[in-house]
Image (cartoon, rainbow, N blue to C red):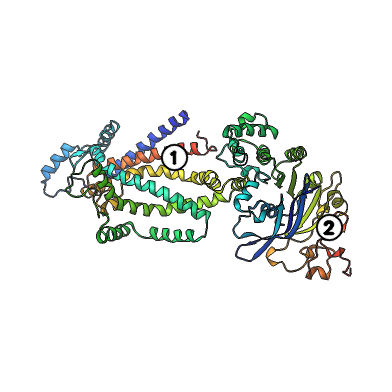
């Protein structure tokens, strides 16, 4: 196992190096930068600023500096926000993470339940109803569902706030603060869960249908086990195996924020910051964020491979 | 000998949307205590569906036992609730299957899978069940039982897995063991070992065996009584020696003729001409008529009943009906 990990981690470093090169060239070779955006500056002032920020150095040297700092845990300085990139990440990412972790948990929980029941009672009224609802939810764009729910639940019924993370002008602390955040996050979490449940529950349904037909399920029944045992101990464990691959992809999604949802619900998350930085061509922040996602993706894949080995005795990592 | 299980007029149909398939069509049979009954027939003749009907595990969509009674221990298994049937399944009646490689759950340890029915049916604690599991593994002739108990199915060979299946099946001291083609997927030497083992357990505990097979060699070796099925019907049944010596039904005769004989060189092995009829297109007739060399007019229009044709031997064939004028 440790030999495998050493090998995998060295591969990961190579992949990340290649990714960093790609990410850097993408942003560095795009014409224009943060400074050329600002029409109020005179050409002399622009040249001066480029000198200060090191943007006039040869490309390879700039990459070298960026990498050197990155290895030392410094992803650079946001030109637009005038703060270190990592400080900004720390300010915004956890807000996105909060939405993502709650909705991911709910999505998986609901998807497993819906998937298992639909598979077990295939073509029943429950299965048919779920299929219709899932395809309806999957066919509607996220902004539509988002705005629709804001109209119904926030504007008309006034049950939930339409956006933001805290009530404007609030100075709640402790439990009150906690409650306020939960109150505000309910709507975006509902929308994100609705959007995620669809495809995932279809996935579990088909996986479960395959497993239920296996010989070992017949054996389990022939042994006289309770149907719940057959389903959850014998079938579900096997049906969940292919989903482990998805766990790896969830890791970057947990920290990556959601551009559309955060925009609709005015949630102060990393997705909004990312979108805003795009408009301003704040390249250090964009590079840093893309790199962070690359790192998380690579780690996520490693985690899912290791989980596979734990969950499925037939898998041996070499 | 007392009847252990008695099946009366069992019919199991499948409806897959294209029409009704009579997989098992009004069959009656019995297995007496300590007896081995073999059910023989080609693929799709209803042998396995008969077994699954007994177990209450006809589970493919559209499959249903539509008629009949299965008397076991003074109860009709078809009238029992799911819970009552579950206490019999894997305990009084247990079953082993054709494909040992896929019959065990790949993500659970061998030990856990043997322990499950012990915990459910005999209320053993986990620790007791584990000890019993190790005993059972030894009993089916696998050494290093202490190690095997903690291994996974993919680490064992097909023959060993079938032994494990037998260990699971005999763990509750069943009165009836249903073996659905238990040796088909195994090579010949392992086959013999598995059959020996079944016979040995049968003698030790006076267990009855219902053995489903298409291998007449296995039948000759194991059976006390043989039932021949064709297209969901029983066409002939009888005591094993009699049936092998003088088969009555043309289908049984064909089956026996198509079996290779050791030390006898044949250029070409006999095979019954024609194909098994499409179960969706069956009409009132002897289902074997278009493959039969003795086919008469009545065979095409009327179904023969299973009736006594010799001592301890029954056949469903118009050739043996006295009222029919033979042509």
| The C terminus of chain B: image quadrant | bottom right
Query: What's the CA distance linking mark 1 and mark 2?
Result: 62 Å
- Name the subunit of mark 1: A
Q: Is residue A238 left or right of residue B70?
A: left
Q: Which of B276 and A267 lies nearest the eye of the viewer?
A: A267
Residue B154 position, x and y percent, is 59, 38
Q: Is residue A311 left or right of residue A259?
A: right
Q: Is residue B251 left or right of residue A298?
A: right
- Say whether mark 2 and mark 1 are on the same chain: no
Q: Is residue B315 left or right of residue A233?
A: right
The residue at 83%/71% (across/down) is: B297
Give neighbour class at mark 1: few <14, some 14-19, many 20+ (Cα, 10 Å). some
Disc marking residue B314 = 2
Q: Which of A244 and A168 lies nearest the eye of the viewer?
A: A168
Residues marked 1 and 2 touching at CB (< 8 Å): no
The residue at 41%/48% (across/down) is: A108
Residue B123 position, x and y percent, is 60, 38
Residue A157 position, x and y percent, is 27, 60
């Amino acid at each position: 196992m440790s030999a495998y990990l050493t090998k995998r981690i060295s591969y990961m470093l190579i992949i990340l190096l290649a990714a960093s090169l790609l990410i850097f060239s993408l942003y560095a070779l795009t014409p224009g930068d943060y400074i050329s955006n600002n029409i109020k500056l005179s050409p002399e002032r622009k040249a001066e600023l480029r000198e200060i920020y090191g943007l006039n150095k040869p490309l390879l040297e700039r990459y070298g500096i960026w990498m050197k700092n990155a290895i030392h845990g410094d992803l650079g300085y946001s030109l637009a926000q005038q703060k270190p990139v990592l400080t900004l990440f720390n300010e915004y990412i956890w807000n996105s993470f909060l939405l993502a972790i709650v909705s991911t948990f709910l999505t998986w929980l609901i998807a497993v339940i819906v998937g298992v029941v639909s598979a077990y009672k295939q073509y029943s009224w429950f299965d048919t109803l779920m299929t219709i609802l899932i395809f309806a939810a999957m066919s509607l764009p996220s902004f539509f569902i988002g705005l629709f729910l804001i109209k119904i639940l926030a504007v008309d019924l006034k049950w939930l706030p339409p956006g933001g993370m805290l009530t404007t002008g609030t100075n709640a602390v402790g439990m009150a603060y906690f409650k306020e955040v939960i109150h505000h996050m309910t709507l975006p979490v509902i929308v994100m869960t609705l959007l995620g449940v669809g495809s995932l529950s279809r996935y579990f349904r088909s996986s479960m249908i395959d497993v239920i037909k296996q010989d070992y399920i017949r054996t389990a029944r022939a042994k006289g086990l309770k149907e719940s045992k057959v389903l959850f101990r014998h079938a579900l464990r096997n049906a969940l195996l292919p989903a482990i691959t998805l766990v790896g992809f969830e890791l970057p999604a947990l920290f990556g924020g959601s551009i559309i949802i955060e925009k609709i619900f005015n949630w102060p998350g990393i997705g909004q910051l990312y979108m805003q930085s795009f408009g301003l061509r704040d390249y250090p922040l964009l590079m840093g964020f893309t790199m962070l996602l690359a790192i998380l993706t690579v780690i996520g894949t490693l985690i899912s491979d290791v989980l596979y080995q734990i969950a499925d005795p037939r898998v041996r990592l070499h | 000998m007392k009847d252990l299980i008695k099946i009366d007029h069992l019919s199991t149909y499948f409806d897959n949307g294209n029409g009704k398939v009579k997989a098992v069509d009004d069959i009656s049979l019995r297995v007496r205590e300590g007896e081995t009954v073999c059910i023989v027939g080609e693929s799709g003749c209803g042998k396995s569906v008969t077994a699954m009907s007994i177990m209450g595990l006809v589970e493919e969509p559209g499959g249903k036992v539509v008629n009949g009674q299965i008397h076991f221990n003074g109860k009709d298994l078809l009238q029992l609730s799911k819970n009552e049937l579950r206490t019999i399944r894997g305990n009084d009646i247990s079953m082993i299957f054709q494909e040992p490689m896929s019959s065990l759950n790949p993500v659970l340890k061998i030990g856990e899978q043997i322990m499950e029915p012990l915990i459910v049916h005999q209320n053993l604690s986990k620790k007791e069940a584990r000890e019993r599991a190790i005993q059972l593994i030894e009993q089916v002739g696998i050494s290093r039982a202490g190690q095997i108990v903690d291994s996974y199915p993919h680490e064992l060979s097909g023959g060993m897995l079938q032994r494990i299946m037998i260990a699971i099946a005999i763990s509750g001291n069943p009165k009836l063991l249903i073996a659905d083609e238990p040796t088909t997927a195994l090579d010949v030497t392992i086959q013999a070992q598995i059959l020996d083992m079944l016979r040995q357990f049968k003698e030790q505990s006076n267990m009855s065996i219902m053995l489903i097979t298409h291998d007449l060699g296995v039948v000759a070796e194991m059976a006390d009584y043989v039932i021949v099925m064709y297209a969901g019907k029983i066409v002939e049944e009888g005591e094993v020696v009699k049936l092998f010596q003088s088969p009555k039904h043309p289908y049984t005769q064909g089956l026996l003729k198509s079996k290779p004989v050791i030390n006898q060189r044949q250029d070409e092995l006999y095979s019954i001409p024609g194909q098994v009829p499409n179960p969706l297109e069956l009409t009132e007739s002897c289902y074997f008529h278009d493959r039969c060399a003795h086919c008469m007019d009545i065979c095409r229009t009327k179904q023969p009943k299973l009736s006594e044709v010799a001592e301890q031997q029954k056949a469903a064939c118009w050739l043996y009906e006295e009222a029919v004028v033979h042509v």
